[in-house]
Image: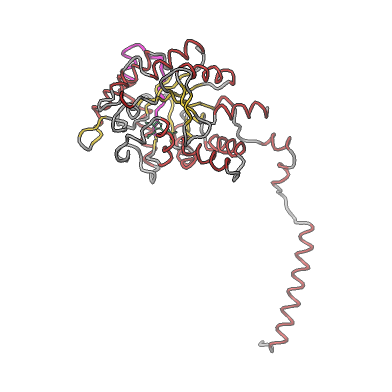
Amino acid sequence: MVWPLPQRQERDLKRGREAAAASATAAKKLDLASRLRRNRKADWARRLVRENTLTVDDLIWPIFICEGERTRQPVGSMPGVERLSVDEAVHAGTEAAELGIPALALFPFTEPGLRNEQASEALNPENLVCCACRAIKRKVPNLGLITDVALDPYTSHGHDGILRGEQIVNDETVFVLVEQALNQARAGADIIAPSDMMDGRVGAIRAGLDAENFEEVQILAYAAKYASAFYGPFRDAVGTNATLIGDKRTYQMDPANSDEALREVALDIEEGADMVMVKPGLPYLDIIFRVKERFGMPTFAYQVSGEYAMIMAAAERGFIDGDKAMLESLLGFKRAGADAILTYFAPRAAKRLKEMA
Ligand code: PBG
């Protein structure tokens, strides 16, 4: 039936009023069997149902080592982070141990005059990383020390490998990396962490370590490491922004890929990795999740320099609450399946967790 217009409007109005009345009644009481908010009603209730927790045991503190004594050089793009001379790095080691942080990861700022095409300083038993390892071990023997295997802080061109023409040559680089790893193990490194992304380096390093009776030295493979814009501040810290020619896309992974990360991880496990890492962190939580699900290996995440810098910069400007964003981002890694997190926030997070306990 086609009603005349005014009558239709009146009908619609009436129906509208009825519907509004009905929904007002419903708003007083919905018939819901499940109300998820019940478990959130108080702090004690939220604690009971909490699925993931962040503790100090999850934290690895990356530090930068520089020449000198009693020297602390601020890194401009990483507020709160300083390069430390070896004696200051020992203090950082003591602080880490006091806070209960299980391990440090060491990165050098190599003097520009010591960088060359062959990265020979990487093999110097007296280089900054080796000196720091020995000094920290002497003072805090129970603190884990992780050393980075890659040539970028030592090459004049800032690449992680040996450059021939326009190519980073894989196999030749791997031979140098094995020597670098042995140099670090002799200085007392507990965990060797190849971050170079050459093919076959984990197996070669494992064989090299075993041949020198370093069976106990672990390998943390930067298994899925992406060619990322988030490494910028780190490259300031180790001085490779100044040296790097081109980019690292022929060896670091394409950010578009995910299945390929699983192949990288599978190979590193086959080759003898004790733990695997995904890097960067927050933009790659899906990779952490897939890796943990597929392999069930100790899986570490690296909250890299650019992630740290973003949180710090936003907090400094008052856009976000720095402490809360820090803890939320770290908890996100745990939820995704990470067992441990390398983070420049490590000492700050450890302190906050202690205060909250
Ligand atoms: C070098 C290395 C990098 C990082 C760790 N090891 C930078 C790079 O690959 O250029 C990045 C860490 C960070 O950004 O915090 N092989």
Q: Is residue 209 magenta?
A: yes
Residue plotted at (79% across, 62% down): 25
Residue plotted at (54% across, 16% down): 94
Left or right? Give the position of 345 relative to 263: right
Left or right? Give the position of 45 relative to 286: right
Residue 72 in percent (x, y) is at: 48, 24
Ligand 1 position by quadrant:
top left
Residue 340 in percent (x, y) is at: 51, 29
Quarter location, residue 95: top right
Of all residues shown, which one is farthest toward the left? 165
Range shown magenta: 206-223
129, 47: nearer the viewer: 129
The N terminus lies in quadrant: bottom right
The C terminus lies in quadrant: top right
Residue 355 in percent (x, y) is at: 67, 27
Quarter location, residue 264: top left
Q: Is residue 47 magenta?
A: no
49, 243: nearer the viewer: 243
Count the marks: how many? 0
On screen, 211 above or below 288? above
Quarter location, residue 195: top left
The colouring scheme, among rainbow, by chain, secondary structure or one colour, is secondary structure
On screen, 252 above or below 19? above
226, 9: nearer the viewer: 226
Residue plotted at (51% across, 18% down): 93
Residue plotted at (47% across, 15% down): 136
On screen, 3 above or below 29? below
Residue 333 in percent (x, y) is at: 53, 36
